[in-house]
Image: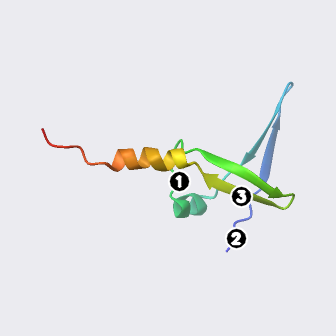
Amino acid sequence: MGFPTKIQLIKRTASEQWYINFPSAVAQAMEFQKGEVVEWVIEDKKRMTLTRSTKNEDENKDKKKPVPDR
């Protein structure tokens, strides 16, 4: 199942910013976390791949480690 999404452009005097928002269902299915870092890889002019940073995985592992009792 696909989720059509419009690309937004905000033009300013000295710059442009492009935005793609993820539908909530996609973000939840991917289990995205606030502040998570991802990387876009351009495959060709019709395809981009979004990849999670391995740094995110390392940070999440650290958060899940049990804290020893003192």
- Upstream in sequence: badge 3 or badge 1: 1
Disc 3 to disc 1, how far (Cα)? 16 Å
**Badge 2: few (under 14), some or many (20 or more) residues near its Cα, within 10 Å?**
few
Amino acid on which the number 1 mark rests in the picture: Phe
Residue 66 place in picture, x, y as percent: 26, 48
Q: Quadrant of residue 16?
A: top right
- Mark 1 or 2, nearer chain start: 2
| Quadrant for the C terminus in the image | top left
Tag 1: Cα neighbours inside 10 Å, few (<14), some, or many (≥20)? Answer: some
Tell me the residue at 87%/58% (across/down). Answer: 45
What residue is at 63 percent from the left and 54 percent from the top?
Answer: 51
Locate residue 3, reporting x and y percent: 69, 66
60 or 1: nearer the viewer:
60
Mark whose residue sits in front, 1 or 2: 1
Residue topped by disc 2:
2
Where's the N terminus, which quadrant?
A: bottom right
Task: Please determine whether, in this image, residue 28 is positioned above or below residue 33.
Answer: below
Q: Residue at x 58, y 48 (%)?
A: 53
| Badge 3 or badge 2: first in the primary sequence | 2
| Mark seen at residue 49 | 3
Looking at the rendered structure, the secondary structure element under dot 1 is loop
How far is mark 1 from mark 2, CA to CA?
18 Å
Identify the amino acid type marked 2. Gly
